[in-house]
Image (tube, helix red, strand yellow):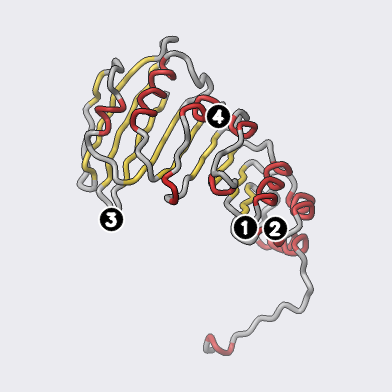
């Protein structure tokens, strides 16, 4: 039988709740792990979404096309364990402090290339999440240097890992980031797609050991990753 001979028609007027029940039955799935809001999501009634899906451990918020709707998603579904949010979901691309101070297990923030915005040092120090992930097109080297120094002095006590990814970095960026910071280099293997792969051990004032890893990937668009794991 040819594919053209196959036809399926939806003879039932399924709503969101009916489709959810159907999917849960077909795939033997009894719990919704995540909710994602993205472009044109504002067309859906937020109260109905909350009633249908309930609480979730993972929430992703991109710009739906309505700043008010983005705010309503956060109000309805927070708190959660894991939050991924794009900064342009807010009119000034600034994440409100009431979100930054929450005790997420993981907070991931993505900044768009337009305007070359990036998280500020004050915002970073406000974050209480165990894991922090930042995506940006900027290379905020001096800010990262200050952040590492303040973390060593006791800032961000809940943080277990920090990772920032930015474009078009240089292999010498690590010299600026670690300027004035006492650390010991740990030998790393550099794979063919890497321009740099360096790691350094350092300690907080409370004795907590952390490894700072700096990698520059030689992709079509150069990607630089700075990671701190305590």
Q: Tag 4: Cα neighbours inside 10 Å, few (<14), some, or many (≥20)?
A: many
SS class, disc 4: loop
Q: Residue at x 39, y 22 (%)?
A: 146
The residue that mark 1 highlights is: 65
Q: Earlier in the sequence, mark 1 or mark 4?
A: 1
In front: mark 1 or mark 4? 1
The residue that mark 3 highlights is: 220
Spatial separation of the CA atoms under disc 1 and disc 4 = 27 Å
SS class, disc 1: loop
Quarter that holds the N terminus = bottom right
Q: Tag 3: Cα neighbours inside 10 Å, few (<14), some, or many (≥20)?
A: few
Horizontally, residue 23 falls left or right of residue 100, namely right
Nearer to the camera, 212 or 91: 91
In front: mark 2 or mark 4? 4
Q: Residue at x 49, y 45 (%)?
A: 110
Rendering coords of residue 21 (x, y %): 75, 60
Spatial separation of the CA atoms under disc 2 and disc 1 = 29 Å
Spatial separation of the CA atoms under disc 2 and disc 4 = 32 Å
The residue that mark 2 highlights is: 24
User: Can you tell which quarter of the image residue 153 is in?
Assistant: top left
């Amino acid at each position: 039988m040819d594919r053209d001979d196959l036809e399926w028609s939806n003879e039932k007027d399924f709503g969101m709740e009916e489709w959810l029940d159907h999917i849960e039955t077909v795939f033997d799935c009894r719990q919704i792990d995540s909710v994602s809001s993205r472009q044109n999501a504002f067309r859906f009634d937020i109260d109905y979404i909350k009633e249908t899906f309930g609480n979730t451990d993972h929430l992703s918020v991109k710009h739906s096309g309505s700043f008010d709707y983005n705010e309503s998603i956060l109000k309805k579904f927070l708190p959660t364990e894991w939050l991924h949010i794009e900064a342009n979901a807010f009119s000034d691309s600034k994440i409100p402090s009431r979100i930054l101070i929450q005790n997420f297990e993981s907070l991931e923030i993505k900044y768009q290339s337009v305007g070359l915005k990036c998280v500020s040092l004050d915002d970073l120090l406000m974050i209480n999440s165990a894991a922090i992930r930042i995506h940006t097109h900027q290379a905020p080297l001096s800010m990262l240097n200050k952040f590492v120094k303040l973390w060593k002095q006791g800032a961000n006590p809940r943080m277990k890992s920090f990772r920032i990814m930015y474009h078009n970095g240089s292999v010498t960026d690590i010299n600026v980031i670690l300027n004035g910071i006492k650390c010991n280099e740990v030998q790393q293997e550099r794979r063919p797609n890497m321009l740099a792969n360096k790691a350094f051990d350092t300690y907080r004032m409370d004795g907590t050991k952390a490894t700072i890893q700096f990698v520059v990937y030689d992709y079509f668009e150069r990607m630089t990753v700075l990671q701190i794991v305590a």
